[in-house]
Each structure stands twice: as C-alpha cells, then as structure tokens.
Amino acid sequence: MTEEAARYIEAVGRRKESSARVRIYPDVQDGQILVNDKPLEVYFPRERDRIHLMEPLKVVGLEGAFYITVQVKGGGISGQAGAIRLGIARALVEYNPEFRSVMRRGGFLTRDPRVKERKKYGLKRARKAPQYTKR
C-alpha cells in the first residue's frame, strides 16, 4: 500500500437515489464527522438521521474513534443517511475484517434495494388508477 492510500480507508454506500463516498482516517483520533464539508449536526438536523448513520460505529464500539469525511449527493435526507450508514459499515469492515460478522448480523452490510417505482401509462402514478365511473 502506498503512503497516500494508507492515510484513509474509502468505501461507497448507496440508497435510493443517494450515493455517499466515505473516508475513514484511522490515525486521526478526532471523532469528528464532516458531511459535504459541514459538521454532522449541521447537515443532519434531525437526531433520528444522525443516530441511524452512527449505528455501525456504535455496534463495534468505535464511535468517536475516527475522523470521517463524507461526500454525498442525490436523493433526500433519509436516503443520504442510509447511504452514509452503508459506506461507514463497509469502511469499518475494510479497516478490520473481524467486524464483518457483527456488521452482517446487524444488517449494516446489506444494500437496501427499494427504489421508487416507475409511473405506468394509463395511470396517474405508479399504481394509482383514474377513478372508475359506471355512468
């Protein structure tokens, strides 16, 4: 591994239309998480989203142990939080392969396949049909 590559571990997480590139810096014991160059609390004002994406770190007992930067784009707030969560879990497994069984048991390594269903012709939305009138 080169000196440049040894500085951080990178992983990609996706959910719905969101895609997140997560970098974990193991040598920096900062505990700070930056999302699109903003602190986590600023980017995700809802506590539910922050708790959701911190779960992989909490399960292995390493919350606050790394400096993490995230570049996320696309989708909405909860989709982005889910993408970051998957990215963090994948990066932690790359950091320490022993975490794989714990992450797998918690369901953190499974990509959520649910996406928006496409609209069909003759319908108003994906499944909603125009109201039927008999006369």
Image (cartoon, grey):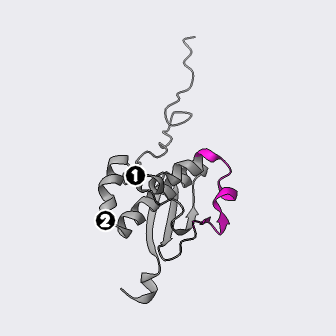
Write down the quadrant of residue 9 in the picture: bottom left
* Residue indicated by mark 1: 108
Q: Separation of disc 2 and disc 1 at Cα?
A: 14 Å
**Which mark, residue 97?**
2
Residue 71, x across and y down, in percent: 57, 67
User: Which residue appears at 52% of the width and 53% of the height?
Assistant: 53
Is residue 44 found inside the magenta-colored segment of the image?
Answer: yes
User: Which residue appears at 51% of the width and 68% of the height?
Assistant: 66
Which mark is first along the chain, 1 or 2? 2
* Residue at the far bottom in the pictured view: 3
Question: Split into 4 quadrants, where in the image is the C terminus?
Answer: top right
Q: Nearer the viewer, residue 118 or 84?
A: 84
Q: Nearer the viewer, residue 30 or 45?
A: 30
Q: Nearer the viewer, residue 134 or 26?
A: 26
Q: Could you tell me which secondary element the residue under label 2 belongs to? A: helix
Residue 55, x across and y down, in percent: 48, 51
Q: Could you tell me which secondary element the residue under label 1 belongs to? A: loop
Q: Is residue 17 above or below residue 95?
A: above
**Few, some or many residues within 10 Å of mark 1 (<14, 14–19, 20+):** many
**Which mark, residue 132?**
none
User: Which residue appears at 59% of the width and 44% of the height?
Assistant: 48
Question: Split into 4 quadrants, where in the image is the N terminus?
Answer: bottom left
Write down the quadrant of residue 97 in the picture: bottom left
In this rendering, position of residue 120 left or right of residue 94: right
Q: Is residue 51 above or below residue 97?
A: above
